[in-house]
Image: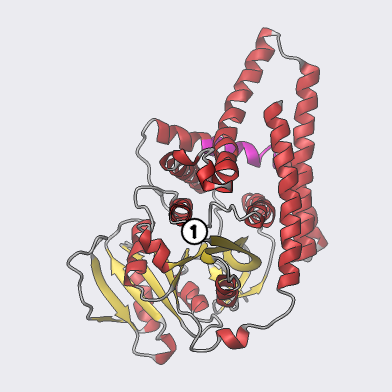
Amino acid sequence: MGFTITLFTLFSIMGYLSTKNSIHYRKKNSFGDLSKVMASPLAPSITIIAPAFNEGLTIVENIRSLMSLRYVNYEIMVVNDGSIDDTLQKMIDAYDLFKIEWEKDPNWRHKPIRGIYKSPHRAFSKLTVIDKENGGKSDALNTGMALSTNRYVGCIDVDCLLLPDALLHVVKAFYQRSEKRVIAVGGVIRVANSCIIEGGQLEEIRLPRSWLARFQLLEYTRSFILGRMAWGRIDSLLIISGAFGFFDREIALAVGAYDTDTVGEDMEIVFKMRRYMHDNKTPYTVEYIPDSLCWTEVPEDLKLFVNQRDRWARGNLETLFKHKDMLFNSKYGRLGLLSYPYWFFYEWLAPLMEFFGFFTVLFFAYVGILNWDFFIAITVTIYLFSVMFSFYAILWEVYSYNEYKKTKDILILMFCALVEPLFFHPIVVWSAVRGNCKKLFRVKAGWGSQVRKGFAQAS
């Protein structure tokens, strides 16, 4: 009962903080136009690193999207991580790439590079393709960081579509602080399933046709619009999505970049960078952008979805274990006293308690010691609170960004909120339990296959 009350309190506070932060962000960004400044060749340099493994279905369209960004001083570095399909050949054919000479580092710490490709055409001058042996997503990102010479690096999923103004918002986030060094910038991830994409541009936003994708859309709305916005308000954000994360390259390299021994590399690198700044007693912050800048494809196949959440659970446990000395450690301020405990008790422990609690209830009912009145009352209360929180996330999204303008779409999302605790949430819990069991019992498991359907095209 105490755990439930604590969660109710935390989520209520989270809703308040996220709302306050959203209003503050909208007011702060309602004036001033940085587009002219950030279009200048003197603007800070950024390298966008996009690992690619068997992405032949969408790779050309994704690169086209990245090359259409409204920014001058940036480069695109696609790291082909040992693809066994036609990913590399499609890039070579589409952008007329040829292999260039490069100086090999005898102390190279990552998987061997088979070749670096550039295009002779000025229109594609921002594009660099690195072909390397397979080493996983972390190794591919680290390869890009090592070869980049720019001040900032953006680590994204290659299947993501960035809106044209994305880098303007990112650079603004890096430079809007004067008293603290901004070491990382993250943002909202939107669901692109069923949206219309033409020429690498998002032409029409549509609600996903797949019910599994719709549930994920609701979950993303709740997580990004409310959850991470709230943690950003108190400067305690511990994770930046691997689909859209930008880093101060100097600090990222100082902590050893991404850890290749974990499948939760996006969370682990933020932990390391924050610890590094705390240990060096340097004022810093992590910025969060709530604008809809990044759109990605989510799994529509149940098996792929379960594998994804299984991997997230393993990555969560790996990161929490590596940094276990932060738990209730006042040395790390709010990170040790609030953020880490939240991730430990809610993100890791809660699914396990929920799963085993279900069987405990069945056992109590079987032996006749279950207090049915209390059980029904607490179950209905939890259900109504979860639905209310989801409704609030949907309505706040409509008020603040209104990406889905059809009344029918909003009603469908609200229906998803009503049935999510009964159908979608149990799958999420089971996936988390499976991932934790794999990690705890040392079952060998990696990233797993990532199958893309590709984006819908305008007809």
Q: Which residue lies at the image location 46% right of the left edge and 57% below the top edge?
A: 277
Q: Which residue lies at the image location 58% right of the left edge and 41% below the top edge?
A: 337
Report the residue that reaches farthest toward the left.
106
Q: Position of residue 178 (x, y in %)?
A: 58, 71
Compared across the picture, whether 344 is left or right of 16 comes to left
Main secondary structure of the magenta stretch = helix
Q: Which residue lies at the image location 50% right of the left edge and 76% below the top edge?
A: 66
Q: Please give the range of residues in magenta.
A: 420-432
Residue 237 can be seen, yes or no: yes
Residue position for label 1? 242
Residue 413 can be seen, yes or no: no
Amino acid type at circle 1 is Gly
Towards the viewer: 139 or 106: 106
Compared across the picture, whether 11 is left or right of 70 comes to right
Q: Position of residue 52 (x, y in %)?
A: 40, 64
Quadrant of the drawing holding the N terminus: top right
- Write down the quadrant of residue 6 in the picture: top right
Q: Position of residue 237 (x, y in %)?
A: 58, 53
Compared across the picture, whether 454 is left or right of 211 comes to left
Q: Is residue 379 above or below residue 45?
A: above
Towards the viewer: 449 or 441: 441
Q: Secondary structure at mark 1?
A: loop
